Amino acid sequence: MKGIVKRVNANTRIKAKIIRVIDPDGKQLGIMPLNEALEAARGFDLDLVEVAPNSNPPVCRIMDYGKFLYQESKKGQEARKKQTSISVKEVKIRPSTDEHDIQFKLRHIQRFLQAKNKVKVTVLFRGREITHPELGRGLIERIRKELEGLGTPEQEPRIEGRSMTMILVPRGEKSVTLESKRES
């Protein structure tokens, strides 16, 4: 995928019959037929590149096509370099989970939040455990309080079927769900 640039029409690939032409210095040469524009580009010993194909008439610029493609690929690389990806990690527990196991899961959640990942905490109810949702809510509230310095809830705890879920985001990350609720 690296180095892939959206194809831009150049020289004989340009479909329009009449185009607006801009010279290498950025000055407009005016609206002219395609064959005259190609002759003007040959006069500069450069290529005719379609920069705005959707305008009426299409805008073409006289420039070095290879250099243009190189600069576009570099822009794409810079954009990918600055892009951050946040993944959602899930931790599942049960209302009857032992204290040692809860501490173990808490350490995992801390590690995920420190690595700037979102964490989905799921409390699974089996059998008749679903008749006591307050046990699951208490467990989730405990996890929220113990991780208060590291993460904030993006989504409040809610029951879906036989599970209760809450999503935590790392401290400093924007909480989209809570902010949109505050605006309305």
Image: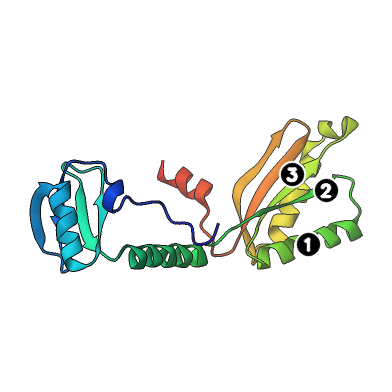
Which residue was labeled with disc 2? 93
Q: Position of residue 28 (x, y in %)?
A: 10, 59
Quick check: 132 left or right of 50? right
Above or below, 25 relative to 58: below
| Picture disc at residue 137 | 3
Q: Position of residue 3 (x, y in %)?
A: 49, 62
Identified at 24% across, 65% down, the residue is: 46
Locate the N terminus by quadrant.
Answer: bottom right
Judged from the image, the secondary structure of the residue bearing numbered disc 1 is helix
Judged from the image, the secondary structure of the residue bearing numbered disc 3 is helix
Instruction: Give the CA distance from mark 3 to mark 2.
Output: 12 Å
Q: Position of residue 155 (x, y in %)?
A: 60, 46
Above or below, 9 relative to 79: above
Mark 3 Cα shell of 10 Å, populated few (<14), some (14-19), many (≥20): some
Mark 3 belongs to which amino acid? Answer: Arg
Q: Do tag 3 and tag 2 residues touch (Cβ < 8 Å)?
A: no
Q: Pick whichever, 29 or 102, lies toward us.
A: 29
Mark 1 belongs to which amino acid? Answer: His
